[in-house]
Amino acid sequence: MKEDSPKNPPSMNLALWLTVVAIVMGVVIPSIYEEPKTALIAATEPEIGRPEISDPLQDKPPPSKLDKPLPIMGWNSAERHFQPMVMKAANRHKVDPAMVMAIIMAESSYNPKAISKKGAKGLMQLMPTTARSLGVKDSFNPEHNINAGVRYYKKLLNQFDGDVKLALAAYNAGSRKVREHRGIPPYGATKFYVKKVIKYYKYYKTLIDNSRLYS
């Protein structure tokens, strides 16, 4: 059996292989070396597309343990960096900051330069038309992206009478689709997205509550 070269330990080979596969498949993940928690969460979840322009019959994400809580691992550097912007926007628009952080994690894994296959950009993955309607000229500007994304989410919350799940479904699939189906659209990707954000929400809610408890 050929042994791995000391310059390339097995863990490094595996990490590099996973990164190459992720890039080829168009999945945006953060550095697997710097942020093991974020990379672990992001790398084990499929990319969420935009169901309004995809085939609902093909939106069948693989099974995921969404019913099990994530282990609490503390804030990573990206979360700490963007937290003040999240808190500012959440307070301005009266939205739960834990939900904002959950949406960012689900949408971009805290990559401010993320671009989806459908053209959504930035931390909260604003589509070009949505960004223009919200007056955003540069979706890669983290503060502008977060403020616009939170403002848009708040609009959806109001539109669906405070129903968080419907607002999340509309954020992913579009409000028209939610109205047409009078509920969460029957797209596997959208159903998965809603469950994933709720799971992240519980995680960030615990982190924020713990931060307040020990501050």
Image (spheres, rainbow, N blue to C red):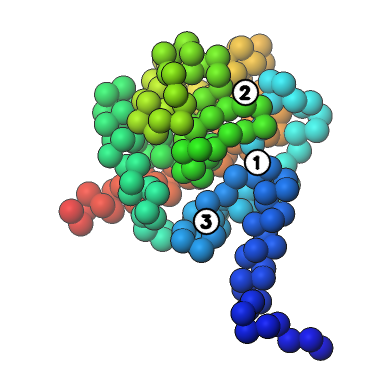
Tag 1: amino acid? Glu
Q: Position of residue 102 (x, y in %)?
A: 45, 40
Q: Position of residue 98 (x, y in %)?
A: 37, 39
Q: Residue at x 37, y 26 (%)?
A: 144
In depth, the one of 60 and 18 nearer the eye is 18
| Residue 32 quadrant | bottom right
From the viewer's perspective, tell me whether residue 25 is left or right of residue 167: right
Is any part of residue 52 visible from this angle? Answer: yes
- Which of pointers 2 and 1 indicates the residue nearer the eye? 1
The residue tagged 1 is: 47
In depth, the one of 66 and 151 nearer the eye is 151
Q: Residue at x 47, y 26 (%)?
A: 139
Q: Position of residue 53 (x, y in %)?
A: 72, 21
Tag 3: amino acid? Ser
In the orientation shown, which residue stands out farthest toward the left?
215
- Which of pointers 3 and 1 indicates the residue nearer the eye? 3
Q: In the image, which disc is placed on residue 173?
A: 2
Marks 2 and 1, how far apart at CA: 14 Å
Marks 3 and 2, how far apart at CA: 28 Å
Please tell me whether mark 3 sits on a helix, a strand or a loop.
loop
Please tell me whether mark 1 sits on a helix, a strand or a loop.
loop
Could you tell which of marks 2 and 1 lies nearer the N-terminus?
A: 1
From the viewer's perspective, tell me whether residue 71 is left or right of residue 127: left
Q: Residue at x 68, y 42 (%)?
A: 26
Q: Is residue 179 above or below residue 141?
A: above
The residue tagged 3 is: 31
- Image quadrant in which the N terminus is located: bottom right
Q: Is residue 119 above or below residue 211?
A: above
Could you tell which of marks 3 and 1 lies nearer the N-terminus?
A: 3
Q: In the image, which disc is placed on residue 139?
A: none
Tag 2: amino acid? Ala
